[in-house]
Every structure is written in structure tokens, then in C-alpha cells.
């Protein structure tokens, strides 16, 4: 006999897992984001201490100065778990791929004006290495952070930065060839205007407190660099050479709009937890903000010439507003 | 224009090198050893990371594209399976108990692998290796989450799934997988790569995912099939990374050989011991069987692992010594494990049972040298007792091996009637082991293994009761208090399948389906 | 001599892939199991993009194999046109 299982109406014994129900209340169905995130990380009864860090447990909340009563207070406003994350990125990459193909097939860069091309190559290509630093730092936060709610988006962030480094590489290969990648690396390592930024990136690579690293990288450096490159420089290039470069960097600009919401929400959650957290986060933000501005100034000057001071002021003002809105006292 | 475009087109290898390796640089504002503080203390000598061969050259755009396609397929199958009450289509509700073990024992390991690879993906000094590890970190998160999502619907209808995270960190048999991964992740980054990237992914996951998941499909579980095979498609990349890492270390410096060989020996055995549970799932928990554990072992370990070790012989790698014992034990361990779980069925978060007659016949046929001689009479006796209303439940606490943490039920390699016991002294304390190989692992690093959170010791020390429990109160029942702390709901999560709530519900729901049809 | 192997999920796309592999590797043994197909071959196995494209009647990127792959063994060498599995010993 054929059994039509669809017609069976069954009353479930429970709506979700106990740990999720304990947070949401029983009899509430949970989302895939919640079931795939809440309490996912082990927090007790570890068997051995790391040979590489015997002062801590495998996962240990004391790896940062920030203190939370519940590390699952953090919520990703995008509700990204692996599935939603990859689908979102696949949609973005499909659009960008279309743009790259169009630019390549129609030869839209053939007649790209020499001055704009030089500016794009000199300012954008060395950013591959900044993206790489951002990739490393977010891998670090994912590895040593506490609680899946905040560590999970950081592996996404890490891979996004790798992806963006690869998009920048492709722009370099489209505009020129491998020798330009080499030239950009030499500039990154030797050219005076890049050295403060390289120092900033290398200094973050050795930061031990992962929440401090989150501020230095995701709030401060991204928060000043992306508006500079993908808004201010983008406008300059568009004025000189039309919108082709905006097409090739749309991933980065869409990405920044999307991810800053998550960064702000995370900072806000940590800052509103306690005055102590707020004070530590504010102090980190201030000190990294000033260093990042110092690091970016020679590049803004180079790229934007006489407009540079006004742009730097605008970047600073926008950043301060954003940080204040996220609950920091600057 | 054609010419110019053609000149720019790089091949897969060159393109990938520009997309990854080229991003890296030698730091000067901070010393390299401070940026990468953990990749030298194990004594592995790497002279030239540029010699690293990238396995599977996936750039992020391709990764997102193909992985999203896999995710779309997987969740479409899952949604359809759930909407159609697919759980009622599995061969037999006993099967669902294998999934309970999967969620409580394996899924948390996927998560640990995610964090472990994020750590190694940050710490290795070579850019190519680091990127491959980071991608694996991302994949492993996928595996944890797709498993949770696939099993979420089972949790709504069946017991034993409801508090898997809490259980994994507490229940006695779950300390076997937990300590396995804790061991790997607390080791240095290179040992982690041998432990997980090589021994676990390359040598052993085929045994976990391929025959067992094929068996799940055979038993009508399209949900488990979807997450299992979809996860394994990422494993192909992971296995290749593990193999590449081994070759790379061996090619970089001859002094690496003894260190790597030691890790291969250790982790093959650690993996073999942990797979006892998977073997038991295959032989006892799949109502319809694709192949026996012994057959799976022969195909995926002896044949495929054998080919691998033969290939690595050119570097001086030899087959781990423990393989001889594992080869003898392939005919024993699943029966020993199931008999043990059956007897400790009151303290486990899944139902246990004595196989039906046809199933015992199948086991007799698949294990002609051992089953009838050593195991069938015992299982038949226990089954007979249960039928007479005297279902046996052990109420004592088992002694556990200090290394693999499995109860002492393995027998002497040359005498299947005698339980194997080994021991070592360390700082005036005695430690017990299930085998020569577990003892050897302990003796090599006693400072590490004395730290282990041993579930039975912890119970004796009073660390496994809820905070409001008073063990001095009159009529205190320690075992009940421990189960309460485990969050095992007595009579629902545990005990025999016969008479269980899962059995009754499954039958009722299927009956409803039939009468509706 | 050792076998290399590769296994795919059973579906419409892999039908063409497996046919192409069988044509290009006369020594390969095709082994069908529940929901999967395992292909064993002595020493080495070659998957050719062109052969799959011919079977499918469309462009095929070898990286699409990832979507259907279950497992494999052997050393991998991958170019835009070929995916090779082999043992060196």
C-alpha cells in the first residue's frame, strides 16, 4: 500500500533544542540562524590546555578585556549562518562577474585615460595587501574570540577580505599585467606614502586582545579606508574616466554598506553592556582612529590633492558620528 | 584586442598564485616570529613555503558560486524531506538512534574543526597553506550547521536530540570524541594538520561519511544523505590539503620525518579508536545494511589507506604499527562496543536493543570468524533475559582508558576472551589504558594526558551533580543525579528501544498515515 | 599497483560525467551504490573537460565537479582542461 506521508498531521514533541528554547522561551519555533549559532561553541570541561597558550583554556573569555554576562547577546543583523552567507555572496559575485565580463568583452578599459589608470593602479593595487592583513586579523578573531555569535561573522569577514584582495588583483590584471602587481607590492614595502599604513597593519597583526583587534580592523581601519577609496576616490576616477571602475569595485562598496551594520551592532552590544566596556572600547577607538588617520593622510593627499584636507575632515566627522551612534564616547 | 586579451589570460595555477601567494609579504615593522608565534615550537623545519603546491585552486568568487549551489540543493532536499514528514519514511525508528549519536558526537567536532582551522589558517607562515586552511575553517562551520539544520526536524519529533551541546561536554561516552578533538586543537599547528588534515580527513572520514551515509540513504533518510554527501564533497578538498601538508613537511627537511611519523602513528590510533562508535552505528544501528564495518574498513582503510602509505614510502613513511592490531580488531570491536552500550543503556542518550534474528544472521555471515564464537551467544542471552522481563542494565561505573577514554572493553589482540588492561605510573599516580598504543601515546606526553577531564573520575569527585543537589541527603541516588546533570530525561532519552516513546510515536504516526491513505 | 578512486552523487549531471570518465579510462571500474557511484582505477584516472562537454552539450568548468563530488583518493593535478588522480608509487 502506498503511504502518503504528507497527509499525516503530527504534533511535534518540542519546537527546538533546549538551549535555544531556554533563550527564546519554549514552544517558539527557532530560525536556522538561531539553531545554527546559539551556544555552538564548547564552554566547559576542556580536556587539555593548548601547548601554544597554556595560560588559557581552548576557548577562554579572558582573552579580551571586554566582559559580557552572555556572549550570545551579540546578534548579526544580517542573520548570517553559512547558508545565508554564501547565498548572499554568490548573488553579489554574480553581478560583479557580469560587470567584469562586460568590461573585458567590450574592452571598456582600452581607452581608460592614462592619468586615471595611473591613479587607480597606484592607490588601489597596494590595497591587496591591506585586505590580506584584514583577512589575517579576522581569522584571528574567529580563532581566539569567544562565542559563535561574534566569531562566526568574523570567518565570513576574513574570507570576504580575501575575496576583495582577489577582485583588486583582477582589476590590476585587467588594467595592466603581473608586473603591476609586483610594482604595487614594491610600493607597499618601500614607497614612503604607504609606510604608515603598512606599520598600522603590521602592528594589528600582533594584537593579542581579539576585541581590540576587532575595533582596530573592522571598526576603525575599514571605517576610514572604505569611504575614502570606494566613495571619494571612486568619484574622482568617475569624473576623470567614467563609471567603469565603479562597476569593477561594486562588490567592495556594497560589502561595506552591508557589513558596517553588523560591526556597529556588535560594538553597540558590547558598549551598552557596561560603563567599563564602553570606556575600554572608546579608548581603543580613539587611539586607533588617530593612528589610522595618520596612516591614510599621505594617500589621501596623493590621491585627492588640494581636496585632501576637506576630505580628511569629512571622513573624520562621518566616522565620529558613526562611533557615537554605536554608543562610544570619543 | 583578441591578442591582448589572450596575452593576459593566465592558466589556473598562475592565476591562483597571483590571487593568493602574491598577497603576502615579509613584515618589517613587526618581526615575523611575533606575527607568526606558533609555527616553530614543534620542531618542524620549513625552508621554503614557496614550494607549497596548492591543492584545489579555488578563488573566493568560485568558492561562493559553487558552495551556494550546493547549499541551495541541500536545503531544497531538506525542506522537501521535512514538509513531507520524511522521517516517517525511514526503514525503522531504531535507525533514528544513529542520528542521535551523530548529532551529539560528531557535529560538535565539525564546529571544533572550524575553530581549529581558523587558528591554523592564521598561524602557518605560508600564504598558500593559510588560505586553504581558512577555506576549510569556513567549510567546517557549514558541516556543523547543515547537520544541526538537518537534524532539527528529528529533534521536534524524537527524543535524545534535545540538548546535544550540553551533552557533548558532559556525558561519559561523548568525552571520547571531545577529547579527541581537544587533543588535536591543543597541539601545535603542524600536529593539528597531521591529526585532522591527514589522519582524520584523509585516512578516516571516508569511513565516517561514505558507507554510513550511503547506508542512511538506503534506509530512506534523504536528509542525512543530503548533508552527509554534501559535506563529503568539501572533504575531497580537505583530504587533499592534509595529504599536501604531509608531503610538504617531508620534502622540506629530512629531520621532519621522525616527528611526522610519530604524529601519523599517534593519530591513526586515536582515529581508529574513535571510529569504534561509527563501526557500531554501521553494524548495529542501520536496519538495512549496505556493508559491514569490516568490509568498509577493508575498502577504505586497508585498500585505500594502504595505497596511500605505499605512496608515502618514498619519503620513508612506514605503515603505523597500530594497524596490525586494528586489522585483528576489525572483526571484534563493533560487537564489543554495542554489547557495552546495551548494558549501559540507562546512562546513554539513545535507545539500545538486541538485533533481530535476521540481523544476527547477517552479522554471523559477515563475521564468520568471530561473531558466532564470541558475540552471538552473549547477545542472544541478553535478548532472552529481556524477553523474560529481566532487561539487564549495569549500574556500576566503567573504568575508562586515560587516553581514548573508551570503557575497558577491548580484548587482548591474541585472546578475544580476555579484556586488555595496561597501566603507567606518573608522579606517583597510576593511569589505565585499553591498549599498548594508547599507553604509548600517554607515555610520550604524560603531562598532557593527566589533564584529561575523565567523566568517571569527575563523577566520583562529585563534579557531575547539579549545584542544588545534596549528596549527603538520605536516599541520595548518585546515578539519577548524574543523569539529571547530563539532562538525560529518564525513560525518554535512554533505556531499551522496545517500549520507548520513539517506537510508540513512530508506529502511531505511521498508522495514521496508512489509515489516511 | 594501487587503485585511485573518485565517487559522485547519483544525479542527472553526474551521469554525463561518469560516462565521460568511463570512455576516457577503459580500466576504470564503475561501482554503483545507494545514492552514489564510486569509480576505481589502477594507478591513475583522468577526467577531461572536453569529454564532459561533449556528453553534456554545454560548457563545463572542471571546478563544477566540486558540486557533485563525494570523495576521492590519490594525488590531484588540476588544470583548466584536465583533472588527474594518481599514485606515484
Image (tube, helix red, strand yellow):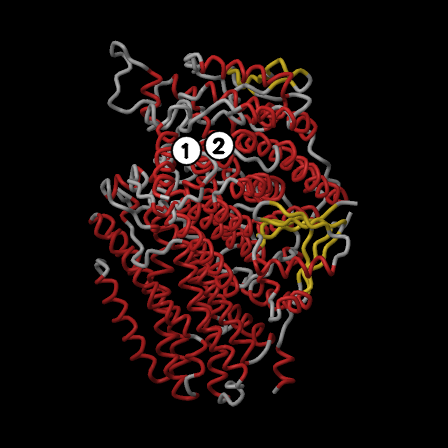
Q: What residue would you read off at disc 2? A: B179
Q: Provide the secondary structure element on which disc 2 rests.
A: helix
Rendered residue at 63%/44% (across/down): B44
* Residue B408 position (above or below residue A192): above
Q: Nearer the viewer, residue B314 or B148?
A: B148
Residue B109: image x %, image y %?
47, 40
Is B135 left, or right, of C17 in this rendering?
Answer: left
Residue placed farthest to the top in the image? B474
- Cβ–Cβ under 8 Å for marks 1 and 2: no
**Which label sits on residue B168?**
1
**Which label sits on residue A182?**
none
Q: Nearer the viewer, residue B271 or A308?
A: B271
Disc 1: host chain: B
* Residue C24 position (above or below residue B274): below
* Residue A192 position (above or below residue B325): below
Of the image marks 1 and 2, the number of the one nearer the N terminus: 1
Residue C13 is at least partly visible in this image: yes
- Name which quarter of the figure residue A240 lies in: bottom left
Residue B356: image x %, image y %?
52, 24
Front tag of 1 and 2: 1
Residue B368: image x %, image y %?
68, 23
Disc 2: host chain: B
Amino acid at each position: 500500500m502506498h503511504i502518503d506521508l504528507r497527509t499525516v498531521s503530527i504534533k511535534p514533541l518540542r519546537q527546538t533544542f533546549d538551549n535555544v528554547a531556554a533563550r527564546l522561551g519554549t514552544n517558539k519555533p527557532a530560525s536556522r540562524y538561531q539553531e545554527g549559532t546559539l551556544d555552538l561553541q564548547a564552554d566547559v570541561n576542556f580536556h587539555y590546555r593548548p601547548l601554544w597558550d597554556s595560560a588559557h583554556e581552548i576557548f577562554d573569555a579572558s582573552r579580551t578585556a571586554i566582559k559580557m554576562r552572555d556572549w550570545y547577546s551579540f546578534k548579526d543583523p544580517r542573520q548570517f549562518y553559512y547558508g545565508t552567507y554564501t547565498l548572499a555572496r554568490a548573488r553579489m559575485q554574480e553581478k560583479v562577474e557580469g560587470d567584469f565580463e562586460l568590461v573585458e568583452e567590450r574592452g571598456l578599459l582600452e581607452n581608460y585615460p592614462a592619468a586615471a589608470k595611473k591613479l587607480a593602479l597606484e592607490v588601489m593595487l597596494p590595497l591587496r595587501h591591506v585586505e590580506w592583513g584584514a583577512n589575517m586579523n579576522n581569522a584571528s578573531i574567529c580563532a581566539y574570540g569567544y562565542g559563535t555569535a561574534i566569531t562566526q561573522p568574523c570567518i565570513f569577514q576574513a574570507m570576504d577580505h580575501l575575496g576583495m584582495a582577489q577582485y583588486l588583483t583582477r582589476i590590476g590584471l585587467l588594467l595592466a599585467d603581473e608586473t603591476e602587481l609586483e610594482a604595487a607590492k614594491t610600493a607597499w614595502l618601500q614607497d614612503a606614502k604607504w609606510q604608515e599604513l603598512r606599520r598600522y597593519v603590521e602592528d594589528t597583526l600582533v594584537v593579542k586582545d581579539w576585541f581590540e583587534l576587532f575595533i582596530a580592523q573592522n571598526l576603525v581601519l575599514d571605517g576610514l579606508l572604505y569611504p575614502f577609496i570606494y566613495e571619494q576616490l571612486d568619484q574622482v576616477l568617475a569624473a576623470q574616466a567614467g563609471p567603469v571602475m565603479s562597476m569593477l569595485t561594486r562588490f567592495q562598496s556594497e560589502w561595506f554598506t552591508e557589513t558596517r551594520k553588523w560591526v556597529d551592532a556588535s560594538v553597540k552590544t558590547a558598549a551598552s553592556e557596561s560603563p567599563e566596556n564602553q570606556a575600554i572600547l572608546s579608548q581603543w577607538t580613539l587611539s586607533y582612529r588617530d593612528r589610522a588617520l595618520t596612516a591614510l593622510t599621505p594617500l589621501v593627499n596623493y590621491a585627492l590633492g588640494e581636496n585632501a584636507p576637506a576630505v580628511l575632515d569629512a571622513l573624520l566627522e562621518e566616522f565620529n558620528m558613526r562611533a557615537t551612534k554605536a554608543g562610544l564616547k570619543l | 584586442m583578441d591578442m591582448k586579451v589572450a596575452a593576459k589570460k593566465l592558466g589556473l595555477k598562475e592565476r591562483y598564485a597571483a590571487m593568493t601567494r602574491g598577497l603576502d609579504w615579509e613584515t618589517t615593522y613587526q618581526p615575523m616570529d611575533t606575527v607568526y608565534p606558533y609555527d616553530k615550537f614543534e620542531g618542524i623545519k620549513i625552508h621554503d613555503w614557496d614550494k607549497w603546491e596548492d591543492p584545489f585552486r579555488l578563488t573566493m568568487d568560485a568558492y561562493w558560486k559553487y558552495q551556494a549551489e550546493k547549499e541551495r540543493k541541500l536545503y531544497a532536499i531538506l525542506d522537501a524531506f521535512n514538509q513531507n514528514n520524511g522521517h516517517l519514511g525511514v526503514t525503522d525508528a531504531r535507525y533514528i538512534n544513529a542520528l542521535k549519536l551523530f548529532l551529539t558526537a560528531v557535529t560538535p567536532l565539525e564546529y571544533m574543526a572550524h575553530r581549529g582551522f581558523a587558528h591554523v589558517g592564521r598561524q602557518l607562515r605560508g600564504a598558500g597553506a593559510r588560505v586553504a586552511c581558512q577555506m576549510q575553517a569556513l567549510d567546517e562551520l557549514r558541516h556543523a550547521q547543515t547537520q544541526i539544520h538537518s537534524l532539527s526536524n528529528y529533534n521536534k519529533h524524537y527524543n535524545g536530540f534535545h540538548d546535544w551541546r550540553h551533552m557533548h561536554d558532559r556525558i561519559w561516552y561523548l568525552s571520547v570524541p571531545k577529547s579527541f578533538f581537544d587533543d588535536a586543537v591543543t597541539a601545535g599547528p603542524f600536529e593539528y594538520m597531521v591529526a585532522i588534515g591527514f589522519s582524520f580527513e584523509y585516512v578516516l572520514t571516508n569511513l565516517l561519511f561514505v558507507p554510513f551515509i550511503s547506508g542512511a540513504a538506503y534506509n530512506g533518510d534523504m536528509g542525512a544523505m543530503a548533508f552527509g554527501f554534501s559535506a563529503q564533497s568539501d572533504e575531497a578538498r580537505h583530504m587533499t590539503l592534509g595529504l599536501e601538508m604531509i608531503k610538504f613537511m617531508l620534502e622540506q627537511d629530512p629531520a621532519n620525518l621522525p616527528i611526522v611519523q610519530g604524529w601519523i602513528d599517534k593519530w591513526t590510533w586515536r582515529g581508529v579508536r574513535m571510529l569504534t562508535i561509527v563501526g557500531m552505528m554501521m553494524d548495529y544501528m542501520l536496519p538495512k545494511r549496505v556493508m559491514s564495518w569490516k568490509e568498509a574498513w577493508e575498502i577504505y582503510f586497508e585498500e585505500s589507506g594502504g595505497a596511500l602509505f605505499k605512496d608515502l614510502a618514498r619519503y620513508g613513511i612506514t605503515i603505523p604499527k597500530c594497524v596490525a592490531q586494528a586489522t585483528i580488531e576489525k572483526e571484534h570491536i563493533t560487537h564489543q562496543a554495542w554489547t557495552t552500550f546495551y548494558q549501559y543503556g540507562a546512562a546513554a542518550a539513545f535507545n539500545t536493543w538486541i538485533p533481530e534474528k535476521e540481523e544476527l544472521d547477517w552479522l554471523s555471515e559477515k563475521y564468520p570468524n568471530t561473531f558466532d564464537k564470541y558475540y552471538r551467544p552473549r547477545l542472544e542471552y541478553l535478548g532472552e533475559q529481556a524477553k523474560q522481563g529481566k532487561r539487564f542494565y549495569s549500574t556500576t561505573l566503567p573504568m575508562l582508558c586515560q587516553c581514548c577514554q573508551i570503557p575497558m572493553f577491548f580484548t587482548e589482540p591474541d585472546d578475544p576472551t580476555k579484556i586488555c588492561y595496561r597501566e603507567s605510573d606518573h608522579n606517583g599516580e597510576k593511569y589505565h589504558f585499553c591498549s599498548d598504543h594508547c599507553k604509548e601515546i600517554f607515555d610520550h606526553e604524560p603531562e598532557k594526558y593527566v589533564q584529561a577531564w575523565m567523566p568517571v573520575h569527575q563523577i566520583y569527585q562529585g563534579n557531575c551533580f547539579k549545584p542544588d543537589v545534596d549528596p549527603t541527603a538520605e536516599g541520595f541516588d548518585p546515578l539519577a543525579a548524574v543523569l539529571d546533570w547530563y539532562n538525560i530525561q529518564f525513560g525518554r532519552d535512554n533505556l531499551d528501544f522496545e517500549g520507548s516513546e520513539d517506537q510508540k510515536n513512530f508506529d502511531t504516526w505511521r498508522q495514521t498515515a496508512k489509515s489516511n491513505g | 599497483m594501487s587503485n585511485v578512486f573518485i565517487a559522485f552523487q547519483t544525479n542527472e549531471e553526474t551521469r554525463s560525467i561518469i560516462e565521460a570518465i568511463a570512455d576516457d579510462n577503459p580500466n576504470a571500474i564503475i561501482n554503483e551504490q545507494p545514492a552514489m557511484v564510486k569509480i576505481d582505477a589502477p594507478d591513475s584516472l583522468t577526467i577531461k573537460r572536453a569529454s564532459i562537454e561533449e556528453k553534456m552539450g554545454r560548457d563545463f568548468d572542471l571546478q563544477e565537479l566540486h558540486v557533485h563530488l563525494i570523495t576521492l583518493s590519490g594525488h590531484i593535478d588540476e588544470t583548466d582542461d584536465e583533472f588527474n588522480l594518481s599514485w606515484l608509487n
